[in-house]
Amino acid sequence: MEILVIGTSNTIVKGGWFDSFTSSVGMSVTRIALGGAPFLQFMDVSGRVKSNDYRAIVVETSPNDESYPSSVGSAWTFDKLYHDFIVSLNSIAPVFVLRIPPQDKWRSNSPIASRQKHICELAGAHYFDATDVMLQSSREMGAEVYRDKYHPMTPVAARVGAHLSDFIRGSNFRPRRTARPCIVGSYALRKIDEFGLEAVSFSNSLVSEDFSIIPLGGKVVFDKPIFCLGFWMLSGRTNAMVRFEGPRESRDILCRYRGVPSVGAVQFVPITDGFMTKSISVVKPWESLRFGLHSEPIPPPFEFGLSGLLHYIPA
């Protein structure tokens, strides 16, 4: 058996907490990591893993959760989805949430962190706040705590990994307490590869995904509406005003990342508070936006590289 780690860019940093953790925990460790978005991008993980595969699951999403909570939605939406996320994972193996705070929340009270800690307590998950370890390590090493807004200095992060290993082994890999599951429905990835669109693949050491390219004027229509919470897109092939049409209204989302196609090549984009969607299309930006005098237009080509949609499936 092994440990599953679900994390953000802090989990990818070479020599950081993840490398230190794997070298000290004494077990095989598998990693699912993608930066740039809150926990929502991992909502479908519980449906993709087997309960007998892992002895523990580590969740490291705090920097993005605390920095971009409004991208998920209202406080009710955020808490409901985070609760479902932790409970679903805790039904597979004991969950250990690692909090590495963003720089602006390090010395101040974080309402998001407080709510997430409370949700973990209700869901029977462990919660390890690395703040004190980071401060102590910084003082002992005479080093700065952070190298940027979201990432601790590598030696500081390495200390966090070692302390987390001790914390998990000290728990004997037992859940904090047994929680009664209370999720109605599930969360899954909805691919769109049946629509005959141009297909491209992307892979690196952490991600391997197939994408469908929706061109300007292209439209994907579902057999029945689905409740979308976000989508995974290929930034190097995305420059579009994406229109999500629902039964009664539509929502336009501008996705333009062509300036840095090699950075965050695969990105998750939350749909705030979710949206009941019956079709997706790429429209001309000026059909949705009004440009001011002397403003710079969004240059073509317009296209949308979509891997799939995160959607909620009622029970």
Image (cartoon, rainbow, N blue to C red):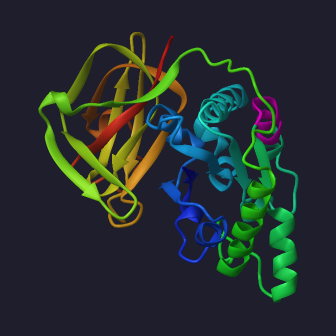
Q: Nearer the viewer, residue 279 or 193?
A: 193
- Viewer-nearest residue: 8 or 285: 8
User: Does any portion of residue 300 appear in the rendered image?
Assistant: no
Q: Is residue 27 magenta?
A: no
Q: Quadrant of residue 114?
A: top right
Per the picture, the main secondary structure of the magenta-coloured stretch is helix
- Total of numbered circles in the picture? 0
Q: Position of residue 149 (x, y in %)?
A: 67, 67
Q: Is residue 232 above or below residue 184?
A: below
x then y, percent, for residue 213: 20, 43
Vertical relation: 296 (above or below) 191 = below
Query: Over which residues does the magenta segment extend?
Result: 116-124
Q: Residue at x 51, y 22 (%)?
A: 186
Task: Tell me where residue 287 appears, x and y as whole percent.
Answer: 31, 33
x and y, in percent, of residue 221 in the image? 24, 20
Left or right: residue 125 versus residue 56 is right
- Quick check: 127 left or right of 267? right
**Quarter location, residue 224:** top left
Q: Is residue 100 visible?
A: yes
Q: Residue at x 76, y 26 (%)?
A: 179
- Give above or below for 102 relative to 251: below
Residue found at x 25% / y 46%: 210
